[in-house]
Image (cartoon, helix red, strand yellow):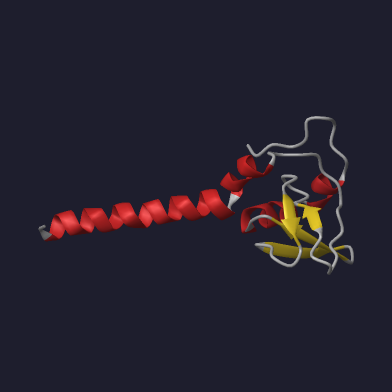
Amino acid sequence: MDAESLKSLGWLVLWGAVFFFMMRFGCGAHGRHGGHGGHGGHRGDESGAALKDPVCGMNVDSQNTAAAAVHGGRTYYFCSAGCREKFEKDPQSYLVEQPAGGHHHG
């Protein structure tokens, strides 16, 4: 194998790994866990019980979560840093009950 082929193979492996981790742990994981649900201000607890990400509705475990944020004295848990960033930009929009069908990434 020449240097250019190795470089191309390296990029393919790198992007494959990025894709894998985003689908496994990022917003791509939603489809595997029941999709998007409704919203509400699900307060965090310390028991490790399943909670809902207020942005996408995915179930998250407070003891094994990708991200968390405190708002109004409550801790909210998120499936990914991306969902936490969306929440931090406009938390009130995610703490109001949504009509049936829930919120979808877009």
Which quadrant does the C terminus fall into? top right
Q: Is residue 73 above or below residue 25?
A: below
Residue 74 in picture, x, y percent from top left: 87, 64
Whether residue 91 sits left or right of residue 105 in the image: it is: right
Which residue: 33% across, 55% down?
Answer: 13
Residue 6 in picture, x, y percent from top left: 19, 58
Quarter of the image where one finds residue 49: bottom right
Which residue: 62% across, 42% down?
Answer: 32
* Along the viewing direction, whichever of 18 and 97 lies nearer the viewer: 18
Quarter of the image where one finds residue 56: top right
Residue 22 in picture, x, y percent from top left: 52, 52
* Along the viewing direction, whichever of 25 and 56 lies nearer the viewer: 25
Q: Is residue 86 above or below residue 69?
A: above
Which residue: 84% across, 36% down?
Answer: 98
Whether residue 84 sits left or right of residue 27 in the image: it is: right
Whether residue 98 sits left or right of residue 67 in the image: it is: right
Residue 20 in picture, x, y percent from top left: 46, 52
Q: Is residue 81 above or below residue 23?
A: below
* Along the viewing direction, whichever of 21 and 67 lies nearer the viewer: 21
